[in-house]
Image: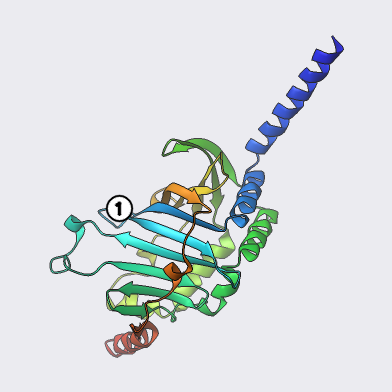
């Protein structure tokens, strides 16, 4: 009688621990942070949908830890033929590289360098897995009302964690939109800043088997999905050559920051 009783108590204790983990979103976020930090590479099919697009964008994403300790990413997006504007059907395939050196879009024999993006100089630190893990831990320590449910994504059982956008973050976004250079661009196309929906919360789907993120949604205050990104057929720690994250040799690089500055100057002259 004693042995079954002890075994039963142990089983009950184990069940209670598992239940506690599955009902605590912060524990799930910690599990995911730890699982992500162990990734040396991955490959997955990716589907991106936005509230303004008529057709989902599909492609393949590759990510790998590079010798300098940062994560490099390559996204190869394919646009459906029936969604392409007239005259663009014959355009060469393009892909995007994000490395510690910056973000690039490669199209045929040309490269557009997006070094004009704010904060790009801090990209190396941001892409460091340990820095990302610490960022997650800092976010968990804040007083945020996380939500947790269960669901399915592509046949996978998932934890679904909802994270509301903090009021401070929303104010920062609004301030940037009101004072940033895009204000002039919005004025040129006669669109009010108030018409742009702001993210009220993020909803993240974690695979219960691997604890890795397989889907993320960005919702507005009316729970409308502004953008969703789904990883399908995710292959962790797959062999990926470093060459996949390098620009082709002898290729023309166009600096988009200079073009943006000209656009802003022209916009101001039209006011």
At horizontal 64% and vertical 65% (from top left) the residue drawn is 131
- 8, 25: nearer the viewer: 8
Considering every residue shown, the one lying at the far top of the view is 1
Number of marks in the image? 1
Considering every residue shown, the one lying at the far left of the view is 86
- 62, 152: nearer the viewer: 62
Residue 49 at what x, y percent from top left?
A: 34, 53
At horizontal 62% and vertical 55% (from top left) the residue drawn is 38
Q: How is the image coloured?
A: rainbow
* Left or right side of 263 for 38: right
Q: Mark 1 points at which residue?
A: 56
Secondary structure of residue under mark 1: loop
Residue 62 at what x, y percent from top left?
A: 44, 60
At horizontal 60% and vertical 49% (from top left) the residue drawn is 32
* Left or right side of 164 for 88: left
Query: Can residue 26 be seen at all in this image of the molecule?
Result: yes
Q: Which of the image's four quarters has the N terminus?
A: top right
Q: Quadrant of residue 51?
A: bottom left
- In the image, residue 164 sits, relative to residue 66, either above or below, namely above
At horizontal 48% and vertical 61% (from top left) the residue drawn is 63
Give the class, few, some or many, for how many residues have Cα within 10 Å of label 1's Cα (few <14, many ≥20).
some
Residue 112 at what x, y percent from top left?
A: 35, 79
């Amino acid at each position: 009688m004693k042995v079954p009783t002890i075994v039963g108590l142990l089983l009950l204790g184990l069940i209670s621990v598992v239940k506690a983990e599955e009902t605590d979103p912060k524990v799930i976020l910690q599990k995911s942070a730890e699982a992500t930090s162990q990734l040396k590479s991955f490959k997955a099919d990716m589907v991106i949908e936005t509230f303004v697009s008529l057709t989902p964008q599909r492609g393949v994403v590759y990510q790998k830890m590079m010798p300098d300790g940062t994560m490099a990413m390559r996204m190869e997006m394919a646009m459906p033929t029936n969604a392409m504007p007239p005259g663009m059907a014959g355009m060469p395939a393009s892909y995007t590289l994000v490395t510690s050196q910056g973000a690039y879009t490669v199209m045929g024999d040309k490269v557009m360098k997006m070094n004009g993006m704010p904060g790009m100089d801090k990209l190396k630190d941001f892409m460091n897995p340990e820095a990302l893990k610490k960022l997650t831990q800092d976010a968990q320590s804040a007083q945020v009302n996380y939500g947790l449910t269960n669901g399915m994504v592509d046949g996978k059982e998932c934890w679904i964690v909802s994270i509301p956008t903090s009021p401070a973050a929303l104010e920062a976004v609004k301030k940037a939109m009101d004072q940033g250079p895009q204000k002039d661009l919005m004025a040129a196309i006669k669109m009010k800043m108030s018409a742009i929906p702001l993210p009220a919360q993020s909803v993240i789907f974690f695979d219960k088997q691997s604890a890795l993120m397989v889907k993320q949604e960005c919702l507005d205050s009316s729970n409308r999905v502004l953008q969703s990104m789904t990883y399908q057929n995710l292959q962790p720690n797959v062999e990926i050559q470093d060459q996949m994250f390098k620009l082709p040799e002898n290729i023309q690089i166009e600096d988009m920051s200079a073009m943006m500055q000209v656009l802003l100057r022209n916009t101001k002259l039209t006011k």
